[in-house]
Amino acid sequence: MASNLDHLRIDPDRMLAAFNELSQIGATGDGGVDRPTFSEAHLAARKWFRDQIEKTGLEFHTDGAGNHSASLPCGPKASPTLLLGSHLDSVPKGGRFDGALGVMAAFEVLRTVKDAGLKLKVNLEAIDFTDEEGTLVGLLGSGALTGRIDRDLLLSPRGGRQSLEEGLRRAVLSDDSVLAAARQKNTLAGYLELHIEQGKRLERTGINIGIVSAIVGISSYRLTFTGRADHAGTTTMQDRLDASQGASAFILSAREIVIKEFPDCVVNIGKMELIPGAFNIIPARAELWLEFRGPNEKEFTRLDTALIECARNEARRFGLELKTDFLGKHSPTPMSAGPQKAFMDACDTLRLTHTPLVSGAGHDGQSFADICPVGMIFVPSVEGASHAPREFTEWEDCVNGANVLLQAALRFP
Ligand code: GLV
Ligand code: MN
Ligand code: MN
């Protein structure tokens, strides 16, 4: 049914001005940004967002996990809050749209609703979640807010304990404050996010909006293959206990396993360190950062077993020891039916084409499964590029996404 709110739109120029200002913070000069969690640039972006919130007369809110948000009490007194948001941290030398677009769109939606003086059934909050990208922990802010972070995870985070300690200190936070950031479930009406697709499906099909049906599961491990340091020139090939050989064999076998047996999954070894690390010393140790992803829990669990088994076999084959440090898992997460329907209706109102999509990237929405209704939309990524400076989305598509977010929020719940 058409309503007068169907005609409400965000202000594209105001959103662009804010987005461009934000893109300057941590800019790498090639179109990208470098804002890993709690780096100087990330702290500056957070401060900039706080200033913007205060300038617009929205209420600024922060919590023990460092989440920053703007609140608009536009619902009845004591009504739950609909969160809209994403993240201002980036991967090292990443793109300027990943996360930032979602935060700027959420902020613009609140400004639009505020300017129109609307009363809704829920309060609105535009939130920037801490460490979505996993430089330190991964989904740290959204996980803390939804009570999913425990002390054990903070003691062995995937980015290393020392980095986490230093980062929290720089942001004047602590383990205790993070653990105290959980909100009561009944205060949350839902969570909606706009994000770039980071893949080529929308661009290829010419469809405006992807309505996310599920987000893949993600697991990470540090694998340590240990052999023996020896003279690289005088030790025969047969006598070596070369950690790099077992680690490399594992990397190639992991690829084969996924391609042959797990067509819906992916595996990535994003970092490999050889120790001691010299031309003329046989590597005694190889440390690998392993991450794998899959859209359904059963396959994902089977893949976990297959990869660890493969690492053991390759270690044995090269006479090495293997140590596996599990660094955390986010389960595959279906998106809720209500938000998907709200997004579809919003697209239809705006005359935008849409299609359901599974997200291969992780997102804060994963933290909200089983807590409150959660939904996400994607807008097209040019050439599917992401986690790289050439990441780009046409501004018209960004505006479409922000309008869909606005219209879905107006329809909520
Ligand atoms: C976050 O963008 C991730 O999927 O790693
Ligand atoms: Mn992101
Ligand atoms: Mn990302």
Image (tube, helix red, strand yellow):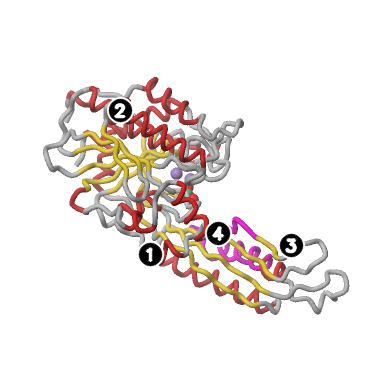
Q: Is 118 rendered above or below residue 388? A: above
Say which residue appears at 23% left-offset and 26% top-offset: 114
Q: CA distance from mark 4 to mark 2?
A: 38 Å
Q: Residues within 10 Å of mark 2 (few under 14, many from 20)?
A: some
In the foreground, 320 or 359: 320
Q: Secondary structure at mark 3?
A: loop
Residue that label 4 marks: 267
Residue that label 1 marks: 151
Residue that label 3 marks: 277
Q: Position of residue 372 (x, y in %)?
A: 24, 51
Q: Secondary structure at mark 1?
A: helix
Q: CA distance from mark 1 to mark 2?
A: 45 Å
Taking the image as shown, residue 349 lies to the left or right of residue 51, namely left
Say which residue appears at 19% left-offset and 42% top-offset: 413
Question: The N terminus is located in which quarter?
Answer: top left
Residue that label 2 marks: 350
In the foreground, 77 or 317: 77
